[in-house]
Amino acid sequence: MATIWKFTKFVLVLVIIALSLWAVLANYSVIFSKTVIGEITGVERIEIPVALMANNGNDITSKVFSFAIGIKDLKTGEIFTASSEDRQWAVADKGKCAEAVFLPYPPWQFTKKDTFFGARLVRLFECPK
């Protein structure tokens, strides 16, 4: 009876560890996201002809609303860049300030290490003088 209880506890601990590891791996970008508050140094929208060429039978809507974003952190002066398919960036202008959440690529994607694939616009406001 004692060995069955030990085995059950072992399996339960193993399942909890596996579920925790899966949760971290599946949500890595959200867990390790970086919030940046700063001045927008650039917001570039993809051009329609480029979106058509990159279509390859995929949904073109996401390509048309694709942006390249650069934000200069107000505290450190570091410029963070990312690509995004968040349509809210269409109203953002260079020179305004924004709070954005940058989602990093996971470390197991070696060719994209230490870069961001998504920038979610949280807040847009006039920069303090």
Image (spheres, rainbow, N blue to C red):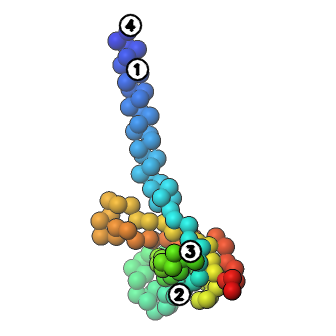
Inspect this view and state whether residue 63 appears: no
Residue 94 can be seen, yes or no: yes
Q: Residues within 10 Å of mark 3 (few under 14, many from 20)?
A: few
Indicate which disc residue 75 carries: 3
* Circle 2 crowding by C-alpha within 10 Å: few under 14, some 14–19, many from 20: some
Residue 8's label in the rendered image is: 1
Sequence-wise first label, 3 or 1: 1
When asked about the image quadrant of residue 43, the answer is: bottom right
Check disc 4 and report the residue beneath it: 1
Q: Nearer the viewer, mark 3 or mark 4?
A: 3
Residue occupying the point 46% across, 86% down: 51
Say what amino acid the circle numbered 2 marks: Gly
Q: Which kind of residue does numbered mark 1 sit on?
A: Thr
First along the sequence among labels 2 and 4: 4
113 with respect to 76 (left or right): left
Between tags 2 and 1, which lies in front?
Answer: 2
Residue 29, position in %: x, y? 46, 60
The reply to whether discs 2 and 1 touch (Cβ–Cβ < 8 Å) is no
Dots 3, 1 in contact, CB < 8 A = no
Location of residue 12 with respect to 60 vertically, above or below? above
**Front residue (pair 80, 122):** 80
* C-alpha separation, residue under disc 3 versus residue under disc 4: 61 Å
How far is mark 2 from mark 3, CA to CA? 18 Å
Question: Answer yes or no: do the residues labelled 2 and 4 have beta carbons within 8 Å?
Answer: no
> Image check: 37 left or right of 2?
right
